[in-house]
Amino acid sequence: MPDKPLPLAVVDIDGVLADVRHRLHHVQGQRKDWDAFFAAAVDDTVLDEGRAVADRLAQDHELLYLSGRPERCRDDTLAWLEANDLPTGRVLLRPEGDRRPARAFKVDRLVQLAGTRDLAVFVDDDPAVCEAARRRGFVVFEATWMEQQPSLYDAQERDGRT
């Protein structure tokens, strides 16, 4: 009899694992430079609290990283996760051209994942995403260790960019 797969823990990256504050200036104000914002992600530092959560979940869950970063950031994102010695896990990014609010994009992905796997917990920092996931019946661990940044919220919820 094959072993039952580990339950799935879905973890966001920006604002949960990655400290994005140093690059928010690229998306503040009228003229947003999304290319510079995402290019600077390679210099994000790891948020200690996020690392602790990911490390703990990896002990008895399969990790999957779900980020609103666009697909074109895949190589940099994978390199960043590895360089910062974060637990291994599959990475799902936002398809190019998908500008839905983060709450719509991420909850759609959660629903798809839950259709095929036991999804135990979802970790995210965006209150709108967390509330939408809870309304759909998901267990949510809301990451509150990085102070909410209005420009990050706008990028996630209004601009559909991360």
Image (spheres, helix red, strand yellow):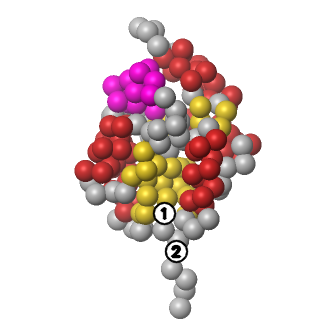
Coordinates of residue 88 in the picture (x, y in percent): 65, 56
Q: What element carries label 1?
A: strand
Q: Residue at x 41, y 21 (%)?
A: 150
Q: Is the magenta stretch mostly helix, strand or loop?
A: helix
Would you say residue 44 is visible in this rendering? yes
Frontmost residue, 24 versus 35:
24
Q: What residue is pinned by disc 2?
A: 5
Q: Is residue 154 magenta?
A: yes
Against 35, residue 110 (above or below) is: below
Coordinates of residue 77 in the picture (x, y in percent): 62, 40
Instruction: Tell me which segment is drawn in magenta.
Output: 148-162
Against 70, residue 3 (above or below) is: below
Q: Does the magenta stretch include residue 101?
A: no
Coordinates of residue 128 in the picture (x, y in percent): 32, 37
**Rendered image: mark on residue 37:** none
* Amino acid type indicated by mark 2: Pro
* Amino acid type indicated by mark 1: Leu
Q: Which residue lies furthest to the top in this view?
A: 30
Q: What residue is pinned by disc 1?
A: 8
Q: Which residue lies furthest to the left in this view?
A: 135
